[in-house]
């Protein structure tokens, strides 16, 4: 599975960005799709998850501000990020595992998000 994240950029604090993650396979072959992020000097952390059934889960850093969604016709997952803060800056990665191989996670190259104060 190949994953390609895009949509990052520079935004002012309080602004919004929408990230996209395009998968090379049908979304219906993916058990979970996840957004992670990594700030400089910090460990990569989970941000949000959407499962095959459409169930969504958010980590505390995302609750109330970020929304994960998907377009099954485009095999693409999105992360709408609102009310961005400087602490949200980092590289955002998408990750997924196949229904045929649950637990074997694939990563795509990240997209940089910069938030100016």
Image (cartoon, rainbow, N blue to C red):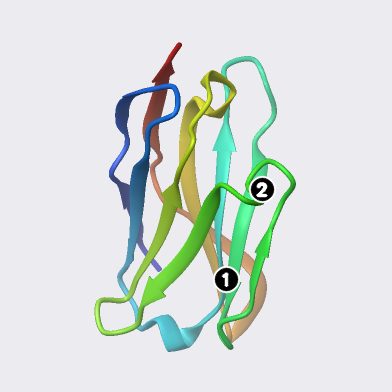
Up the image or down, 113 lies above or below 80; here it is above
Q: Residue at x 32, y 36 (%)?
A: 8
* Residue matched to label 1: 50
**Residue 40 versus residue 82 in the image, above or below:** above
Secondary structure state at the residue bearing disc 2: strand
- Furthest toward the right, the residue is 60
| Among the 4 quarters of the image, the one containing residue 78 | bottom left
Q: Nearer the viewer, residue 71 or 104?
A: 71
Q: Position of residue 100 (x, y in %)?
A: 58, 87
Q: Secondary structure at mark 1?
A: strand
Near mark 2 (Cα within 10 A), the count class, few <14, some 14-19 or many ≥20, is many
Q: Position of residue 56 (x, y in %)?
A: 62, 71
* Location of residue 71 by image quarter: bottom left
Q: In the rendered view, does 112 fall on the left or right side of 66?
A: left
Q: Residue at x 37, y 39 (%)?
A: 16
Where residue 96 appears, as percent x and y from the top left, is 53, 65
In this image, 45 relative to 1: left or right? right
Residue at x-position 49% and y-position 36%:
83
Q: Position of residue 4 (x, y in %)?
A: 32, 54
Disc number placed over residue 46 in the picture, else none: 2
Question: Do callouts 2 and 1 mark residues in contact (Cβ within 8 Å)?
Answer: no
């Amino acid at each position: 599975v190949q994953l390609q994240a895009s949509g990052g950029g520079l935004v002012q604090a309080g602004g919004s960005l929408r990230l996209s993650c395009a998968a090379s396979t049908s979304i219906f072959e993916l058990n979970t799709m996840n957004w992670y992020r990594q700030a400089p000097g910090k460990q990569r952390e989970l941000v949000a998850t959407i499962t095959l059934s459409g169930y969504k889960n958010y980590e505390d850093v995302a609750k109330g501000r970020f929304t994960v969604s998907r377009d099954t016709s485009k095999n693409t997952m999105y992360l709408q990020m609102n009310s961005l803060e400087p602490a949200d800056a980092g590289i955002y990665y998408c990750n997924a595992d196949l229904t045929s191989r649950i637990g074997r996670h694939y990563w795509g190259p990240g997209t940089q998000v910069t938030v100016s104060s």
